[in-house]
Amino acid sequence: MTPRPGASVQVDSPTERRNPNTTDIDLVSTVDILRMIHAEDRTVPDAVAVALPRLAIAVDLAVAALQAGKRVHYVGAGTSGRLAVLDAAELVPTFNAPADWFVAHNAGGSRALKAAVEDAEDDEDAGAAEIRRYVSPGDFVLGLSASGRTPFVLGALATARSIGAGTALVANNPAASVDVDVLVTVDTGPEAIAGSTRMKAGTAQKLVLTAFSTAVMVRLGRTYSNLMVSMRATNAKLRGRTLRILREATGLAEPECSAALAEAGGDLKVALVHLLSGADPRRSADALAHTGGHVRQALRVLAG
């Protein structure tokens, strides 16, 4: 018998269930379609908020790995994998993070970034092989899976644990049960369009990834206050932003900040410590090196 419209069919993950709030989405006006989608999207930040204590544990594990000279790996498939690639790529220009600090592994590889490679996510052995090739003991591996049961991701996480890497999984299924160091579940419930995890689940994963990686960068001293003092000035816009950040952080005029940047060889952090402490650029650079690039700690060192 064909289920009647709105009938509930039991499935393994809440992201696959039909959403009772949107069963008439194909009968309403365009603006009401958008209102239905927006109403569902508004529930995502609150779902993420519930998961923040668990996410904080993952952040601290990632920070410890990077401080020990190891790497952070993202593993995902489909939307999750694409979001992982995006987040990892943006950390280099934003925080001047070394290119190998965050490595994204997407089921199906680069081909899956532009086109769906649906069978790739079902290949548990491929996920395991990816980890064996790229991950070392002491690294930290963060998996992303809306259902919490994507074979590629689970194969990767199991192998990561077996070689001594730290592991975490971000899932949109509160019933997910995976052997990892940290399980971060974000219960976003049924999608506006059943099973379309590019919607609420994807939005939640984007929020989680952005918060995770930004928190890691903050803990590693890649910011001063809420300013991007570790960014790379690779174009005219960013060079202008570098000068603006220095002015905002110090309260000094443009000529003085420009001169400090020139003396520091364009290094924003060195110029900042120089201007805030009064120490010359060489001593400022030494203090930053001694404190692992933490501006506030460098200022305390120079203050003696």
Image: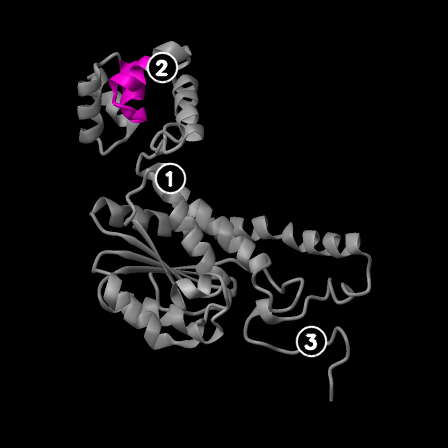
Crowd rating for badge 2 (residues with CA inside 10 Å; few <14, some 14–19, many 20+): many
Disc 3: which residue: 8
Judged from the image, the secondary structure of the residue bearing numbered disc 2 is helix
Mark 2 and 1 residues: CB-CB less than 8 Å, in contact? no
Mark 2 and 3 residues: CB-CB less than 8 Å, in contact? no
Question: Vertical placement of 248 versus 174: above or below?
Answer: above
In x, y percent, where is residue 240? 43, 24
Point out the frontmost of discs 3 and 1: 1
Residue 29 horizontal side relative to residue 156, left or right: right
Question: Where the C terminus falls, by quadrant?
Answer: top left
Sequence-first disc among 2 and 1: 1
In x, y percent, where is residue 11? 59, 76
Residue 276 horizontal side relative to residue 32, left or right: left
Cα distance, mark 3 to mark 1?
46 Å
Magenta stretch containing residue 261, yes or no?
yes
Disc 2: which residue: 257
In x, y percent, where is residue 244? 43, 21
Instruction: Say which amino acid is labelled 1.
Output: Pro
In x, y percent, where is residue 10? 62, 78
Crowd rating for badge 1 (residues with CA inside 10 Å; few <14, some 14–19, many 20+): some
Judged from the image, the secondary structure of the residue bearing numbered disc 1 is helix
Colour convention: one colour
Disc 1: which residue: 93
Q: Which residues are magenta?
A: 259-277
